[in-house]
C-alpha cells in the first residue's frame, strides 16, 4: 500500500512532510523529531531523506522519501526498512 504524504515546499519541493495517509487514515504531523539523508553510494540503495515524526495523537513514525522514484514509505518498528507499504 503506498503512503501518501503532503509536504511543505519552501526553497525546494517536498522540503518536509506535514501529514500522511495510511490505511485510509490521515495523520497530521505535529513535530519533526529528527531527519537524516541516505546518500546513493550503494547502487542498490537509492538516495533518500528520512523523517522521524510525531503525529497529533503523540505517536512516532519514520517516513522515507526516495528521490529517484519520488516515493514515500512508512517504516513501522520491527519491520524491515525496505518495507514498501
Image (tube, rainbow, N blue to C red):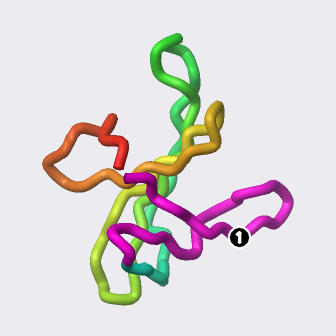
Residue 67: x, y in percent? 64, 37
At a point 31% along the width and 88% down the height, the residue shown is: 57
Taking the view exactly as shown, the residue that stands out farthest to the left is: 78
Along the line of sight, the residue nearer the viewer: 1 or 26 = 1
Confirm whether the magenta stretch covers residue 82: no
Along the line of sight, the residue nearer the viewer: 35 or 72 = 72
At a point 54% along the width and 25% down the height, the residue shown is: 46
Confirm whether the magenta stretch covers residue 22: yes
42 lies above or below 73: above
Q: What element carries label 1?
A: strand
At a point 48% along the width and 82% down the height, the residue shown is: 28
Residue 41: x, y in percent? 55, 15
The quadrant holding residue 52 is bottom left
Residue 15: x, y in percent? 70, 59
76 lies above or below 83: below
Taking the view exactly as shown, the residue that stands out farthest to the right is: 11
Left or right? Give the position of 4 relative to 56: right
Within-10-Å neighbours for mark 1: few <14, some 14–19, many 20+: few
The quadrant holding residue 40 is top right
Residue 78: x, y in percent? 14, 48
32 lies above or below 2: below
Which residues lie in the magenta part? 1-24
Taking the view exactly as shown, the residue that stands out farthest to the bottom is: 57
Left or right? Give the position of 65 relative to 57: right
Q: Name the residue under label 1.
A: 8
At a point 64% along the width and 31% down the height, the residue shown is: 68
The quadrant holding residue 55 is bottom left
Amino acid at each position: 500500500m503506498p503512503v501518501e504524504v503532503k509536504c511543505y515546499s519552501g526553497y525546494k519541493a517536498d522540503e518536509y512532510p506535514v501529514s500522511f495517509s495510511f490505511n485510509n487514515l490521515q495523520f497530521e504531523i505535529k513535530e519533526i523529531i529528527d531527519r537524516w539523508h541516505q546518500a546513493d553510494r550503494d547502487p542498490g540503495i537509492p538516495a533518500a531523506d528520512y523523517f522521524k515524526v510525531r503525529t497529533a495523537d503523540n505517536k512516532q513514525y519514520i517516513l522515507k522519501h526516495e528521490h529517484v522514484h519520488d516515493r514515500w514509505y512508512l517504516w513501522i518498528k520491527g519491520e524491515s526498512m525496505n518495507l514498501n507499504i
